[in-house]
Image (tube, grey):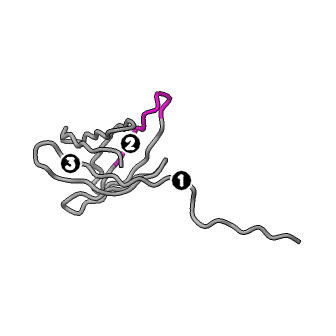
Amino acid sequence: MIYKKLKKGSSAKHDFIQLQEENTKGWLRGYGDETYVRLRDEHGSVWVGTAERGNDDLVYYHLRDAAGRPMSGVATSYTRVFRDGKNRTWKGIVE
Protein backbone atom coordinates (compact mmCIF):
# COMPACT_ATOMS: atom_id res chain seq x y z
CA MET A 1 0.00 0.00 0.00
CA ILE A 2 1.25 3.48 -0.86
CA TYR A 3 0.86 6.21 1.72
CA LYS A 4 0.42 9.85 0.88
CA LYS A 5 1.81 12.51 3.19
CA LEU A 6 -0.91 14.90 4.39
CA LYS A 7 -0.33 18.65 4.43
CA LYS A 8 -0.85 20.40 7.74
CA GLY A 9 -2.77 23.64 7.85
CA SER A 10 -4.72 25.24 5.08
CA SER A 11 -3.57 26.65 1.78
CA ALA A 12 -5.62 29.84 2.24
CA LYS A 13 -3.64 33.06 2.03
CA HIS A 14 -3.47 34.93 5.35
CA ASP A 15 -3.19 38.72 5.20
CA PHE A 16 -2.02 41.08 7.91
CA ILE A 17 -4.55 43.90 8.31
CA GLN A 18 -3.69 47.26 9.82
CA LEU A 19 -6.18 50.14 9.82
CA GLN A 20 -6.08 53.66 11.24
CA GLU A 21 -9.04 55.88 12.13
CA GLU A 22 -8.97 59.20 10.29
CA ASN A 23 -9.62 61.66 13.15
CA THR A 24 -8.42 60.02 16.39
CA LYS A 25 -5.57 58.00 14.82
CA GLY A 26 -6.84 54.91 16.67
CA TRP A 27 -5.80 51.57 15.19
CA LEU A 28 -7.08 48.12 14.36
CA ARG A 29 -4.66 45.25 13.71
CA GLY A 30 -5.10 41.60 12.96
CA TYR A 31 -5.28 39.00 10.27
CA GLY A 32 -7.70 37.55 7.81
CA ASP A 33 -7.98 35.02 5.04
CA GLU A 34 -10.54 34.47 2.31
CA THR A 35 -13.39 33.83 4.77
CA TYR A 36 -12.43 34.77 8.36
CA VAL A 37 -11.19 38.07 9.88
CA ARG A 38 -10.01 38.83 13.42
CA LEU A 39 -8.92 42.35 14.48
CA ARG A 40 -7.98 43.95 17.82
CA ASP A 41 -8.29 47.68 18.51
CA GLU A 42 -6.18 49.93 20.76
CA HIS A 43 -8.61 49.37 23.67
CA GLY A 44 -8.28 45.57 23.50
CA SER A 45 -11.66 44.85 21.90
CA VAL A 46 -11.65 41.95 19.46
CA TRP A 47 -13.59 42.26 16.19
CA VAL A 48 -14.47 38.99 14.45
CA GLY A 49 -16.27 38.47 11.17
CA THR A 50 -16.34 37.25 7.62
CA ALA A 51 -14.88 38.29 4.30
CA GLU A 52 -16.66 37.61 1.01
CA ARG A 53 -15.26 38.08 -2.48
CA GLY A 54 -17.75 39.83 -4.77
CA ASN A 55 -18.25 39.50 -8.50
CA ASP A 56 -16.57 42.89 -9.02
CA ASP A 57 -13.22 41.63 -7.58
CA LEU A 58 -13.80 43.49 -4.30
CA VAL A 59 -13.73 41.89 -0.85
CA TYR A 60 -16.58 42.78 1.53
CA TYR A 61 -16.08 42.53 5.31
CA HIS A 62 -18.72 42.21 8.04
CA LEU A 63 -17.44 42.32 11.65
CA ARG A 64 -18.79 42.53 15.20
CA ASP A 65 -17.12 42.94 18.57
CA ALA A 66 -18.07 41.24 21.86
CA ALA A 67 -20.59 44.03 22.63
CA GLY A 68 -22.34 43.44 19.29
CA ARG A 69 -21.22 46.69 17.64
CA PRO A 70 -21.03 46.34 13.84
CA MET A 71 -18.27 47.28 11.43
CA SER A 72 -18.24 46.76 7.68
CA GLY A 73 -15.69 47.39 5.01
CA VAL A 74 -14.53 46.89 1.47
CA ALA A 75 -11.10 46.14 0.05
CA THR A 76 -9.71 46.68 -3.42
CA SER A 77 -6.36 45.35 -4.57
CA TYR A 78 -4.66 48.41 -3.00
CA THR A 79 -6.69 49.77 -0.06
CA ARG A 80 -9.14 48.82 2.67
CA VAL A 81 -11.86 51.13 3.98
CA PHE A 82 -14.01 50.24 7.00
CA ARG A 83 -16.83 52.09 8.73
CA ASP A 84 -17.96 51.33 12.28
CA GLY A 85 -21.31 51.82 14.04
CA LYS A 86 -20.35 55.35 15.12
CA ASN A 87 -19.80 56.29 11.46
CA ARG A 88 -16.02 56.58 11.90
CA THR A 89 -13.86 55.73 8.89
CA TRP A 90 -10.86 53.39 9.18
CA LYS A 91 -8.37 53.16 6.32
CA GLY A 92 -5.41 50.96 5.51
CA ILE A 93 -3.38 49.50 2.69
CA VAL A 94 -3.20 45.91 1.51
CA GLU A 95 0.03 44.23 2.63
- Horizontal and vertical percent for residue 45? 25, 60
The dot on residue 84 is: none
Quadrant of the image for the N terminus? bottom right
Q: Tell me the distance, in whole angstroms, between the alpha carbons under discs 2 and 1.
A: 17 Å
Q: Residue at x 38, y 42 (%)?
A: 61
Residue 23: name its quadrant: top left
- The magenta-colored residue range is 54-63
Residue behind mark 3: 20
In terms of sequence position, does the residue under pointer 2 or pointer 1 come before the other?
Answer: 1
In terms of sequence position, does the residue under pointer 3 or pointer 2 come before the other?
Answer: 3
In this view, the mark in front (2 or 1):
1
Residue behind mark 2: 61
- Horizontal and vertical percent for residue 85? 23, 42
Q: Residue at x 20, y 39 (%)?
A: 89
Label 1 element class: loop
Considering every residue shown, the one lying at the far right of the view is: 1
Residue behind mark 1: 12
